[in-house]
Amino acid sequence: MTDVRVFGSDGLDATIAVLRRRGYDVFGPTLRDDVVTYGPIESVADLPVGRGDEQSPARYRSRARGDGALFGYAAPVQSAKAQFLPSDELLWTSRPGDAASGPVIERQAAERRPVAFVGLRSCDLAAVLQQDRILTQRAHADVAYAGRRAGAFLIAVTCSDPADTCFCASLGTGPSPGEGADVSLTEIVGDGPHRFVATPGSPRGTELLDAVGAGPASDEDVAAAHRVERRAVTRMGRELRTDDLVGVLYASTESPHWDAVAERCLACTNCTLVCPTCFCTTITDAGDLTGGAAERRRVWASCFTKDYSYIHGGSVRTSTQARYRQWITHKLATWQVQFGSVGCVGCGRCITWCPAGIDLTAEVATLRAGDTALKSSRAAGPRPSPRED
Ligand code: SF4
Ligand code: SF4
């Protein structure tokens, strides 16, 4: 029989406290500059209590929900990527040694406290597992990433209020958390007492629920959790047909639709920076003017920049058409060939945070439909500009 527990917000507070006492750096959703993002938390009071959000292409607004929900919004602006694969990371420093030993290189020590997430979205949990496969389970593991992931404790949450931009249900990555979480939560608000239905996903998840005294859930608790999930599926704002994505993208290599997208795309890189699965980085070296020290850093990179494809003699992808085509073809098609799954978890961030409101679900649908859809969209005139409110 499945082990299902239930506790109130005091139980969630106790969970955060236990994790902190055990030495974890605890992260969860927080409100910063009126935007929900993951950040350090010390108690339930640090969560975006009673806040919801509205997300649509090129638009994000935080709003008051009028209730005490702790997880009543869709994907935060950033995923867990920033904690496990930081946007800017010092790899090593060097200084001149003596004539006999040569330069002294000091690698950055990997000493850090383990990370715990409380309230990780289902799509973000799926993205963490994707990055694990790519960065730690192939021939050469990324040591820095693996060090951060080692021992991480993940408490994921069912999305109760997906945004207009969400489509995780199409990809099987939500709205309820799949495998990989130590504990999966569903928050029940406005359907009996405010409570959390919790399912352990690992022995240490079971142990934590025991430690905070989470009692067994009733049949009504479990039914209420199912209602939250079913309602979320019906509220999902978008969908992405996943059949034959490789065939559709490969057949679209020479599509004139890339020109139509490039007319709108600013090549700003926002979509790649907010994407929880994009993992590309580059290396920067810098030395001080006296020659006394140098450092090497690893920073996030984006295939939307011209420099990203620079090789001897110049860039391979000099046009925005080519760069958008590269991104979406890799994300949805060649990723499957390389890593065995679609490289998108349906979080919708690239739609919300694209200043031009470019929507990959719409672009794929147009490519799928071929030139007919392109001609009719052009006949309908230019698309509206993103809202300015
Ligand atoms: S698709 Fe949108 S977010 Fe991505 S680079 Fe183009 S304008 Fe920026
Ligand atoms: S491609 Fe867009 S919707 Fe898919 S995981 Fe990345 S940001 Fe989310």
Image: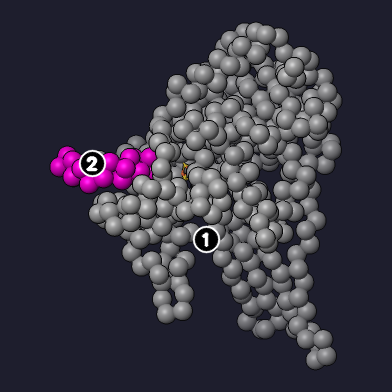
Residue hosting label 2? 373
Depth check, mark 1 against mark 2: the one in front is: 2
Q: Quadrant of the C terminus?
A: top left
Q: Is residue 156 above or below residue 217?
A: below
Q: Amino acid at mark 2?
A: Ala
**Residues shaded magenta:** 359-380
Please name the predominant secondary structure of the magenta segment in the image: helix
Residue hosting label 1? 301
**Residue at (76% x, 68% y) in the render:** 107
Q: Is mark 1 within 8 Å of ligand 1?
A: no
Task: Describe residue 41's horizontal placement relative to residue 235 as left or right.
Answer: right
Task: Describe residue 80's horizontal placement relative to residue 307 as left or right.
Answer: right
Q: Quadrant of the N terminus?
A: top right
- Residue 255 position within the rendered picture, expressed as x and y whole percent measured from the top left: 27, 54
Q: Answer with the quarter of the image where residue 361 lies.
A: top left
Q: Secondary structure at mark 1?
A: loop
